[in-house]
Structures are given as structure tokens and as C-alpha cells.
Image (tube, rainbow, N blue to C red):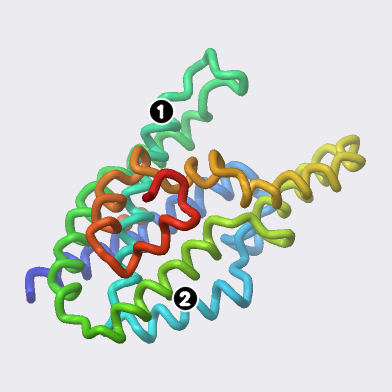
Amino acid sequence: LPLLRQLLMEMLHEEGEHDAAFAALNRASRADLYQQTDFFFFPPSARVRSLITAMGVSARRLAHPLWLLFFIEESSLALARDLAAIGEDHELGSVEPHWLAVHQEHTHDERRHTLIDRLVFESCYGRRGRVARSVDGWMFERILKAILYPRAHGAGVRVVEQLIRDYPELASLRPTMVREIVALGRNPEFLASLLSQRLAPRAWKLFHRCPELDTLAGWIPGYA
Ligand SMILES: [Fe+2]
Ligand SMILES: [Fe+2]
């Protein structure tokens, strides 16, 4: 356990460096938007803030923060891989080199973090009681839905608003863009582009090992 604690402290330190690198990347890309804040498109809603607070309070007894961490960290590996695979022949062209470099650099730590996540998970998962297990399943589903479903005032719509500030000639498309972004929540292909066996194979396998997550089969494409 002391070793695990040390690994976690190092991981925490590295995440601080990652935050700084991504914030610097954002500022380098759009100094005008990121002058005052590191979270221009993602100011967490009151709902997400309360879920995160609940997660922090319960992290000593429950496993769902670890499912989430494992899923997010493994997904960051797929994101870097997919960005690198976008070539010149893509309709939007290849990814801007600084973005590519930061995402690539990020994977060096994240690959190791996913291994640590598993160790921490195994050290606490089996010790939870029946009540904790059902709370865990319930909490994880709430959090995943809050993260994955686009909302009328969420980050996607904020991107649309900024796009219209940058290109006012798009203003007439605003209602259509907002409607279509919100409708993505009902699009299985969209959900599968955020959580799938391909994107996070080890998290996918871990979730299936945990019976309290069986309800995910009701809305995550291909989960059952
Ligand atoms: Fe990170
Ligand atoms: Fe990490």
C-alpha cells in the first residue's frame, strides 16, 4: 500500500502538469478566449459540480470514481491515437502539430496511469458491501450520462455560439446546429464514438466484470 500511495502521489503531480500543458495549448491557440479562464467551453454546470463533490466525499468507500478515472484515462490514449491517424487526406486536413504533440506526450504518462488505476481498483473493489455496490452502480450511471449526453447549454452549444461570434454569417444556422447537437444524445453512433470497446477496451472489460453496471446495457450501444 505505501507503494500504491507513492504511485498515486506521482500521478497527481503529473496530472497537474497535464492541466498546465492543455491550458497552455488552449491559450496558444486562442489567447482571446483563454485570457481569463482555463475553462472557456467547459465551465462545469451546477449539476456536474454536485456530482463531483459527491464523488469526492464517497471516494473512500466507493468504486465509481475509479471506473470513471480508468475510462477517461484509457480514452485519452484512443484520442491521441485517433488524432495521429487523421492525415492530410482528411476532409479537414491533418491535426495542428502542437495539438498532436501535446496529446502524444500526454499518453506517455496516461499509459502508466491506467495500470495504477487497475491496482487501486483491485485493492478496494472487493471490500464494498451490498449497499455500497448498488450506490456505486447508480452513481456511475448518473455521472456517465451527465458527461456523455449533450445538453442545450452544454459545451457543444457553447462551441456553436463561439463559431457564430467568429463567423457571424452562420448566425441563421444557430437553431439547427443547437437542435442537432442536442439530438446527438439519441444517436447510437454518437454515444459509441465516446464509449465503446474499441476506444476503451480494458475499461469495457472491467465494467462487464461488475454486475452493478449491468444497467449500462440499457443505453450504451453494443454493451449487452
Ligand atoms: Fe492526464
Ligand atoms: Fe492520468
**Mark 1 is on which residue type?**
Ala
Q: In the displayed structure, does residue 52 sit left or right of residue 155?
A: left
- In what quadrant does ligand 1 lie? bottom left
* Residue 104 percent coordinates (x, y): 35, 37
Q: Residue at x 53, y 62 (%)?
A: 145
Disc nearer the start of the sequence (2/1) = 2
Callout 2 crowding tier (Cα within 10 Å): few <14, some 14–19, many ≥20: some
Q: Nearer the viewer, residue 103 or 46?
A: 46
Q: Residue at x 15, y 67 (%)?
A: 122
Q: Nearer the viewer, residue 36 or 175?
A: 175
Extreme residue in the top direction: 89
Q: Residue at x 70, y 48 (%)?
A: 183
Residue 166 seen anywhere in this rendered image of the structure = yes
Cβ of disc 1 within 8 Å of ligand 1?
no
Identify whether 224 is placed above or below 6: above
Q: In the displayed structure, does residue 180 sit left or right of residue 164?
A: left
* Residue 188 percent coordinates (x, y): 55, 43
As drawn, the label of residue 52 is 2
Callout 1 crowding tier (Cα within 10 Å): few <14, some 14–19, many ≥20: some
Indicate the quadrant containing the N terminus: top left, top right, bottom left or bottom right: bottom left
**Mark 2 is on which residue type?**
Ile
* Residue 15 percent coordinates (x, y): 34, 60
Q: Residue at x 41, y 69 (%)?
A: 140
Q: Secondary structure at mark 1?
A: helix
Residue 109 seen anywhere in this rendered image of the structure = no
Front position among marks 2 and 1: 2
Provide the residue designation for mark 1: 84
Tell me which corner region of the image, top left, top right, bottom left or bottom right, holds residue 38: bottom right
Q: Secondary structure at mark 2?
A: helix
Q: Nearer the viewer, residue 210 or 140?
A: 210
Tell me which corner region of the image, top left, top right, bottom left or bottom right, holds residue 115: bottom left
